[in-house]
């Protein structure tokens, strides 16, 4: 997975953190959880605020 795979990342986060409300996650934690996903393979420094916002929104949508 790459940073651009927002929906796949969101699915991975739902599966790996089912009890977390994505609306309450800090971007530092979100970044760390994304790079810890087993299939994630991208430059860690590319996970900027805009990408994290998109991932968080996709996670919120996926969790509902």
Image (tube, grey):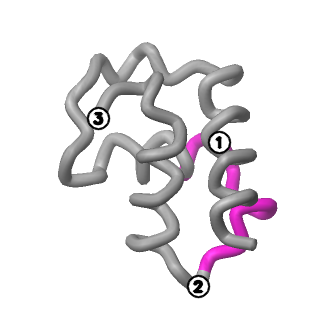
Mark 3 and mark 1 residues within 8 Å of each other at the beta carbon: no
Residue under label 2: 19
Residue under label 1: 27
The residue located at (52%, 80%) in the rendering is 18
The residue located at (43%, 32%) in the rendering is 5
Decide if residue 17 is on the left or right side of residue 38: right
Mark on residue 52?
none
Q: Nearer the viewer, mark 3 or mark 1?
A: 3
Main SS of the magenta segment?
helix
Q: Which residues are magenta?
A: 20-29
Please provide percent x and percent y for residue 63: 67, 70
Q: Quadrant of the N terminus?
A: top left
**Magenta region includes residue 28:** yes
View extreme (bottom): residue:
19
Q: Is residue 34 above or below residue 14?
A: above
Residue under label 3: 1
């Amino acid at each position: 997975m790459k940073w651009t795979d927002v929906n796949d990342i969101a699915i991975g986060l739902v599966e790996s953190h089912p009890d977390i409300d994505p609306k309450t996650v800090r971007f530092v934690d979100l970044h760390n959880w994304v790079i810890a996903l087993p299939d994630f393979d991208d430059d860690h420094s590319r996970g900027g605020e805009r990408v994290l916002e998109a991932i968080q929104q996709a996670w919120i949508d996926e969790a509902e």
